[in-house]
Amino acid sequence: MLNWNPAQYLKFGGERTQVVRDLVHRLSERLDNEQVRRIMDLGSGPGNSTAVLAEAWPQAEITGLDASPTMLEAARAAYPHLRFLAGDIPTWAASATALYDLVFSNSTLQWVPGHTELLPRLLQRVAPGGALGFQIPGNGSAAACRLPRELAALPAWREYFGPGKVTERWTGQMTDFYDLLAPHAAAVEIWETEYFMVVAGVEAIVEWYMGSGLPQYLNALPDDAARARFREQYREGLRAAYPVRRDGRVLFPFKRQFVIARPAAG
């Protein structure tokens, strides 16, 4: 189970929100913006994505949905004028009946299982003329994301990482999104963008992942001493993978995968 810390997540709020802005910009080019009246933001987290949606479509009724109590508390405190509900995405997709002009999700669906059933169901929640738009990280094979898995598999650590200790991320391909959505869609648009963040050093990369997937590895360990050792080994692996540039900084590449699907008529 992932434990979300809103303050940690928002240490890189600008970088995390830029991805939202880029997807929203593309969606605004595809939609009849005056007709966007209802929006669902799935996995709304601390509300930064919901706020960007509200800026782009101020006339719309916007709802954020999230399963994390800490994220919901932060979102409601930061954006009291917006609506946030507690719930998980598969349950919402299977039980919701209302249609939305935009069903949106940012950096969430990689943690949700069952894409074969889920993605067509999400598209079914889109009103005619609307869109399903989402983004997930595409960096599962990058060192920063791969290293915790490799460490957890080592003899020194594997006893702590039995079944269910770590939430597995989506490991499919971009083409899978097309194959799952195309039979139900009028059009599917998919693309990747690699963002290069300039950071002071590898400790910034550690802090980035402390806001997402790394804490679940640390929480599986028996004590603070073990957590400190695991984190130091992770840091050492990052130093080898992300060399210091001539100016003393580190480049942190981060690939993002984007999908926009339009529902089929009728």
Image: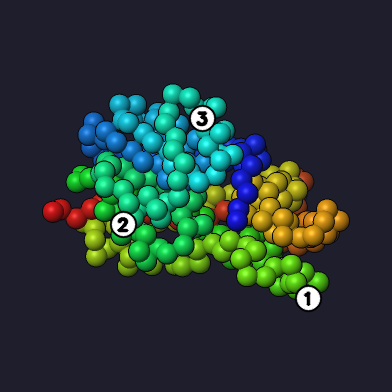
- Residue 238 in sight: no
The furthest residue to the bottom: 155
Residue at label 1?
155
Question: Callout 2: 10 Å neighbours few (<14), some, many (20+)?
Answer: some
Question: How far apart in space, not on screen, are marks 3 and 1 (Cα)?
Answer: 43 Å
- Judging from the image, what secondary structure is the residue with disc 2 in? helix
Question: Callout 1: 10 Å neighbours few (<14), some, many (20+)?
Answer: few
| Quadrant including the N terminus | bottom right
> Which residue is at the front of the view, 228 or 142?
228
Question: How far apart in space, not on screen, are marks 1 and 2 (Cα)?
Answer: 41 Å
Q: Hey, what amino acid is under mark 3?
A: Arg
Q: Which mark is residue 121?
A: 2
First along the sequence among labels 3 and 2: 3
Residue 145, image quadrant: bottom right
- Judging from the image, what secondary structure is the residue with disc 3 in? helix
| Residues marked 3 and 2 touching at CB (< 8 Å) | no
| Residues marked 1 and 2 touching at CB (< 8 Å) | no
Residue at label 3?
76
First along the sequence among labels 3 and 1: 3
First along the sequence among labels 1 and 2: 2
| Residues marked 3 and 1 touching at CB (< 8 Å) | no
